[in-house]
Image (cartoon, rainbow, N blue to C red):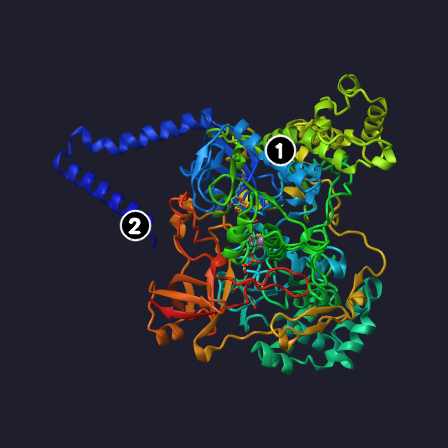
Amino acid sequence: MSEIVDLKRRSFLKGSAAAAAGAAVVSTSAFAFGPYEEAANEKEKKEKEIKNAKFTPNVCGMCVNMCGVIVRSVDGKVKKIDPNPLYPKSRNFMCARGNAGIAEEYDPDRITTPLIRVGKRGEGKFRKASWDEAFDYIAKKMVKILDEEKDNRSTFLFGVGATSGTVDEPVVMNLVNGIGTANFIDHFSTCFAPSFMANALTFGSWGQADFRNTKYLLNLGANRAEGIVTPDTMDMFKRTHKRGIEKIVYIDVRYTNTAAQADEFIPIKPGTDGALMLAMIHETINKGYHKTPYKADYIAKYVDGIEELEEFFTKGEGAKYTPEWAEKITEIPASTIRRLTKEFSDAAEKYKGAANCYRSRKSTWYYQDFEFRRAQAIFNAIHGCVNRPGGIILGRGLKFESYEYEDFPVYDNPKPRIDIACLKPNTYPLANPQKGSWPIIRDTILEVNTKWRKGEKLADNEYPVRAAFHYKQNPLQSVPDYEKTAKMYETMDLVVVIDIQATDTALYADVILPDTVYVERESPIKMFNTIEPYITWRSKAVEPRGYAQDVYFMCKELAKRIEKPFAAITFKYTWDADDLGAELPKDFDLAKYLTDDFEVDEEKLKADIKDEKLVKAILQHASEDDLDIGTYKITAAFEKTVEEYNEETMKELYGEEAAKIAKEWGVYWPGIENAVKSDLLDEHLKAFKKETPDKNELAETIYQKFTTLPKDYYIVPKKGKYIKLAQKTFEGKKFTNPITGKLETMHRFPLWRDSLYKAPNTEEGEVRVVVGRHAYFTQSFHPNNYLLLDLMNYNYLWINDELAKKLGLRFKDEVELTSEQGKKVIAKVYPTKRIRKDTAFIATGFGAQSPMMTLGYKNGISQAMICENTIDPIIGSASMNETLVKIRKV
Ligand SMILES: Nc1nc2c(c(=O)[nH]1)N[C@H]1C(S)=C(S)[C@@H](COP(=O)(O)OP(=O)(O)OC[C@H]3O[C@@H](n4cnc5c(=O)[nH]c(N)nc54)[C@H](O)[C@@H]3O)O[C@H]1N2
Ligand SMILES: Nc1nc2c(c(=O)[nH]1)N[C@H]1C(S)=C(S)[C@@H](COP(=O)(O)OP(=O)(O)OC[C@H]3O[C@@H](n4cnc5c(=O)[nH]c(N)nc54)[C@H](O)[C@@H]3O)O[C@H]1N2
Ligand code: SF4
Ligand SMILES: [Mo]
């Protein structure tokens, strides 16, 4: 039990003992009724509060899931956050973190004033600044950098984080696109890249699980009972243990709460799921499980490459992937692998694809992730489970227009993104050209910037990245190898962090800009193409605390200050004296002549420049098709406020009434008009009416009851063989094995490679560190949340109890972990039978190093400080479970 809870209990006991003593001595005294009177007052106060309360629909900002919430506020203060009954995704549900949103709003450590660094990077010394001062400081540096970099706009790195969802992302993207840098980085490569890419390549989308209708679920390490505790997770658990779902099988390297909810738990050797999947495909093909009537028909209609797959697994390299072969690698008995394959196959046939070998979200685990996830996608496809009820759903959206502005010019001067441009031959052949990779971009910037700072000559594809902007992102704690990320910032001229708290990354910033907390802002409407598609609308419930401002304000104000100088820099560096027949004077600054409408003020120009030929050339160049300076106006994207865009877009797409409902209830789906008129909802309390007979049942069915979309709307109409089992373009691609340093060759089907498997040397006391979620924190976002710390206040290192005995360790004993590369952290241990002997586990989100977070500061173990910089050699995403450590008692 946590110290915080203990403290509370102590004061509670003290209080009640005193009250009891008082009652015994003066039992007739008015004092005796004190507590009752207090309770009565409380009740009255509550009733009054409810009467005066304002109920504002909002979207939970505590994790990526974006559940619908209703904020109850009184006199401009948030009193409680409740779930939104009409929200299809969250269905009147909120998790512990959602409930603790109020602590985010009123965290005493929240930053509510712009801050400018006065100490060294990382030292944590800042001074308060006005917004004008902060913007001027940033703009001045940006203009100087861009001029020195000769208009290479890719010198600015922009990062947007996963937390708080993507609802506000289009606002920031308008600034990013207006500036025109190629270097944009989000959580793709540290989160879901392996699953996403494998599924998208195989069947065009990464798909969603239709847990409500599934009949058989094979879950490989998606810990849904602790990460992503959402209604669809409940859908699956509620129906398990023979209650409507035939079976949930859960496979993990440790016994999690999800394991406890499953019908069967199977432990696996870490990092070997790829071998398991290949054996299950082998068993399917060799037993002909894919030839049963439903599947044969499905495959004939939709699946391309089945003959090749059959050949590969019977006569080709895949013929060796037998269950007996996999047993040696995974430590799962061959008979179990055979049984699981048969069970899955039978369910898929019987229920026409209502089975799912669940793809997981966080899939940045091991070196072989990409091949594992490809095998998983193929397995689902050959059992006919893609785009089927109860299987994997491809998702079909509603009519929608994004807030993202589309009329910015396509810049040709900025260099291509640096992580991709600087890839060495035969490395990361499938690194995503749009998304890039966090570890690779960090490593590349550090390497190139260091060379540049030393004055060394850069190669043609290299250039310095001199500024970083992070919005809702905390790379120091979310990208493995803390030290290296910190070093990258040391090489930059400008770091700007937009956050609500002074995180570790903020400590490295030159300027910290205080954002609003989600309850304090309106966000652009967003469409979700989930099984029950809908549009969401976040409204502002209370005024921002202190001087906090939303990102719309930040992006617009910054854009105002940089757009003219930036346009002038582009103008200068695209000037072609031969083409235009005139030399541009060295000190010429177009910015001075740009009007607010972004036209060149001819009169002013003529007054300053007497050379008519030059004036003509300037005017000509500014209006040339390939330059067209008018399109360089970054604030054009911010002419419409978020509020205006929301109102107008909803009205245009769905009409007045729909827009009104969407705003009032924070959500829109076709048919909601009838739901809100149905008398089931209390408009003032934004909840189901008191007398509603079964609120739970209704929360689950309200969408189906009222939607006007066809029942099978979520099945995307598909024609032809859109599922591709073989990836012919991969054949022969080379990549460098990070363990052996040798070249490996890709095949059109996934392969298992022993040479890419690294096992801890248990003889020498080495174990593998595995990371993962727990139910109370989101990523690196909550180390300082006082309500959540009450539920879990330390992330103990899980180690096997026999290992603990061998090392003489008991619960809470301190140990030092040392990685192969010499990284060290101190941890307190939790010995348990629930984990393998060769594996240790650390839960995510603790170990903040920022002293500006009073409760989070150096509390618990930071994964980013112990995880080594190990990278998937094919797609370039992080491989966070490839760190081996030795444990020493301290
Ligand atoms: N070691 C380790 N690294 C990991 C993971 C792991 O498990 N272990 N998980 C990986 C995964 S799956 C992901 S998705 C990424 C996530 O990594 P990031 O995308 O970096 O997200 P977070 O770590 O949640 O950091 C979010 C930041 O947003 C801030 N924030 C929250 N709300 C607001 C807001 O309203 N406005 C602003 N401006 N800021 C806000 C928080 O204070 C926090 O600093 O991390 C990856 N990295
Ligand atoms: N409460 C909470 N919910 C969240 C988040 C959060 O931070 N907190 N973050 C959200 C985000 S961004 C994401 S990406 C998801 C992440 O949620 P999940 O996808 O569930 O990811 P993790 O919790 O990182 O890890 C999953 C499990 O993988 C197991 N594992 C490790 N190695 C292996 C292996 O070799 N094989 C198998 N089969 N299992 C293995 C780990 O023990 C762990 O239990 O959660 C989302 N929801
Ligand atoms: S899952 Fe929890 S934290 Fe995430 S959006 Fe929903 S209520 Fe908020
Ligand atoms: Mo994630």
Q: Is residue 436 above or below residue 853?
A: below
Position of the N terminus, as image quadrant, is bottom left
- 408 relative to 449 in the view: left or right: right
Is residue 340 at least partly visible in the picture? no
Disc 2: CA contacts within 10 A as few (<14), some (14-19) or many (>=20): few
**What kind of element bears circle 1?**
helix
Looking at the picture, tell me which residue is in the foreground, 97 or 197: 197
Query: Residue 579, percent across and down?
Result: 87, 36
Q: Which residue is mark 2?
A: 6
Ligand 1 is within 8 Å of the C-beta of the residue at disc 1: no
Is residue 834 at least partly visible in the picture? yes
- Residue beneath the point at 75% across and 61% down: 202
Disc 1: CA contacts within 10 A as few (<14), some (14-19) or many (>=20): many
Give, as a three-letter code, the residue at label 1: Cys
Q: Which mark is residue 555?
A: 1
As measured in the structure, the alpha-carbon distance from the residue carrying label 1 to the one carrying label 2 is 45 Å
Query: Residue 452, percent across and down?
Result: 62, 51
Give, as a three-letter code, the residue at label 2: Asp
- 796 relative to 528 in the view: left or right: left
Quarter of the render that holds ligand 2 = bottom right
**What kind of element bears circle 2?**
helix
- 718 relative to 789 in the view: left or right: right
Ligand 2 is within 8 Å of the C-beta of the residue at disc 2: no
